[in-house]
Image: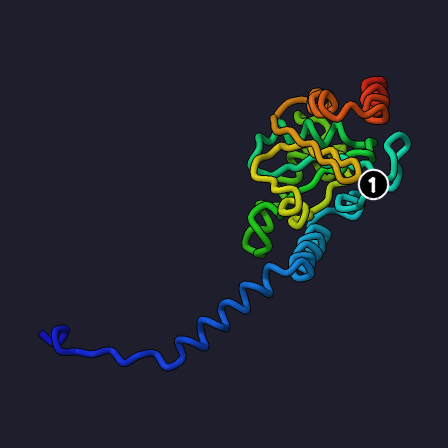
């Protein structure tokens, strides 16, 4: 009965609230703020990844074959099978020409997910999946140059993983699929027809 006669007063702060929300949304989407988030994600990675493998977010330092204007990224996520993720990490160790990229950390930044993050990384960075870690004999770990860069996912419009992106100047070639690195590179190069990428494929075939 009261509901039929009750009148809710208009929110006098409605317009100001909408403007404030729009400004917050715009500020959040700015590239510089997104980079701050990426920096914080990388800092969080350092908190739980042992000192011996804290090069996980470093950029590749050398490109023996690819030209300066050529880049190769492999976009990954914890949503792909652990065996696949571990396989990519193992294959890319010692291959600085390809930068594996993730959008964020497992479970986000919250402390409540720290144990989950540590357990997941311990699995996917293990060289021998059958190894059982003990205080006396720790398992050998992969040391990939993996980077957390959400801005790159937006830049290349990545909606599926794994995705391999080959950039050559203003040209961008990409392909999705949970298959081998060489297969992804070869399929991309069918369209790109890059001599240096062909040489790079030959190189990594020889070292694997």
Q: Is residue 136 visible?
A: no
Seen as rendered, the residue at the extreme right is: 64
**Horizontally, is 116 left or right of 188 in the view?**
left
> For the image shown, how many numbered marks are present on the structure?
1
Q: Residue at x 71, y 52 (%)?
A: 42
User: In the image shown, does 43 or 98 lie closer to the viewer?
Assistant: 98
Q: Is residue 9 visible?
A: yes
Seen as rendered, the residue at the extreme front is: 170
Q: Position of residue 17 (x, y in %)?
A: 44, 74
Residue 147 figure quarter: top right
Quadrant occupied by the C terminus: top right
Q: Residue at x 71, y 35 (%)?
A: 172
Secondary-structure class at tag 1: loop
Q: Which residue is mark 1?
A: 60
Q: Residue at x 79, y 35 (%)?
A: 168
Note whether 181 is above or below 172 in the view shown. above
Residue 67 figure quarter: top right
Note whether 30 is above or below 194 in the view shown. below
Q: Position of residue 91 (x, y in %)?
A: 75, 27
User: In the image shown, does 24 or 149 lie closer to the viewer?
Assistant: 24
Badge 1: residue crowd in 10 Å (few <14, some 14–19, many ≥20): some
Quadrant occupied by the N terminus: bottom left
Q: Position of residue 54 (x, y in %)?
A: 78, 47
Seen as rendered, the residue at the extreme left is: 1
Q: Residue at x 67, y 53 (%)?
A: 41
Q: How is the image coloured?
A: rainbow
**Horizontally, is 128 left or right of 110 in the view?**
right
User: In the image shown, does 67 or 61 lie closer to the viewer?
Assistant: 67
């Amino acid at each position: 009965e009261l509901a039929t006669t009750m009148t809710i007063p208009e929110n006098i702060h409605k317009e100001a609230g909408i403007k404030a929300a729009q400004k917050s949304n715009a500020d959040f989407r700015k590239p510089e703020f997104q980079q701050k988030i990426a920096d914080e994600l990388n800092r969080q990675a350092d908190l739980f990844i042992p000192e011996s493998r804290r090069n996980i977010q470093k950029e590749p330092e050398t490109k023996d074959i690819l030209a300066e204007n050529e880049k190769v990224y492999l976009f990954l996520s914890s949503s792909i099978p652990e065996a696949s993720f571990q396989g990519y990490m193992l294959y890319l160790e010692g291959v600085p020409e390809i930068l594996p990229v993730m959008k964020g950390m497992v479970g986000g930044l919250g402390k409540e997910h720290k144990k989950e993050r540590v357990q997941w990384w311990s699995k996917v960075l293990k060289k021998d999946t059958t190894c059982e870690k003990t205080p006396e004999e720790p398992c050998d770990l992969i040391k990939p140059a993996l980077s957390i860069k959400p801005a790159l996912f937006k830049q290349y419009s990545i909606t599926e993983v794994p995705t391999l992106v080959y950039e050559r100047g203003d040209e961008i070639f990409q392909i999705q699929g949970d298959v081998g690195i060489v297969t992804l590179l070869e399929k991309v190069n069918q369209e790109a027809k890059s001599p240096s990428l062909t040489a790079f494929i030959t190189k990594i075939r020889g070292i694997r």
